[in-house]
Each structure stands twice: as structure tokens, then as C-alpha cells.
Amino acid sequence: MQMAASPTQATTVERPLADTYVQSCQSRNFGTQQVLVNKRYTDGWCGTRSSYLQFSVPCDAQDATLLLSLITYSAGTFPKVAVFQVQGEWSENATIWSSRPS
């Protein structure tokens, strides 16, 4: 994440404090994986995945920009990415589908 510079503050780059993804119909944790996976299945197939990233953002930050590198397996296809602030606690090494935050 890149913090926008203000007249008195330089731009800083922050890496996530924690990251993981969860998969529907799985009670497995993916916190040790090197990549995050997002997929949405609407045909009832069990395999929807959602990713979680945790950052420490200073309370006086005026602006923040999240930069992601996306990998796609369909040539020329770029998925839509939605970013939300989660409500609730989660842990990189313990979060699974049934305990994911809302």
C-alpha cells in the first residue's frame, strides 16, 4: 500500500502485516501460501475463495492507495476486484471459511 504524500509527510510503502485466503467447503487455512486466490462460483460448485490483507494505517493518514499485481489464466481477461474494510478479528494462520470476518 502506498500512502499519499502531504506537505509534511513523505510517501511510505507498507507491506501487509498479515494475509490469507479462505475457500468455501474447506476447513483448511491458507495463511502460509505465497499467493492469494480469489474466485467466485455461482453455479453451486464448492470453491469460492476470498482473500484478506491486513495493514497498519496511521490514524492521521489523509489518503491510501492499494496496489495489487493480478495474475490471470485467461489471456486478455482481467477480473474485477472489490476491496472492503472487514468488520471483526481474523488471523493469518487460523482463519478458515467458517470463521472469516464479514
Image (cartoon, rainbow, N blue to C red):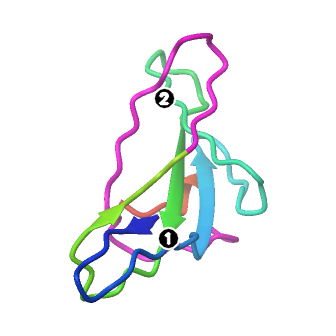
Q: Secondary structure at mark 1?
A: strand
Residue 61 lies, with reference to residue 79, above or below; the image says below
Q: Amino acid at mark 2?
A: Arg
Residue indicated by mark 1: 54
Residue 33 lies, with reference to residue 6, above or below; the image says above
Residue 21 lies, with reference to residue 89, above or below; the image says above
- Is residue 71 rendered to the left or right of residue 100? right
Q: Main secondary structure of the magenta part?
A: loop
Q: CA distance from mark 1 to mark 2?
A: 21 Å
Crowdedness near tag 2: few (<14), some (14–19) or many (≥20) residues, C-alpha within 10 Å: few
Crowdedness near tag 1: few (<14), some (14–19) or many (≥20) residues, C-alpha within 10 Å: some
Q: What numbered label is drawn on residue 40?
A: 2
- Is residue 52 rendered to the left or right of residue 22? left
Q: Position of residue 70 (x, y in %)?
A: 57, 36
At a point 52% along the width and 73% down the height, the residue shown is 14
- Is residue 62 rendered to the left or right of residue 71? left
Depth order, front residue of 38/61: 61
Please give the range of residues in magenta. 69-95
At a point 26% along the width and 89% down the height, the residue shown is 8
Q: Position of residue 74 (x, y in %)?
A: 62, 12
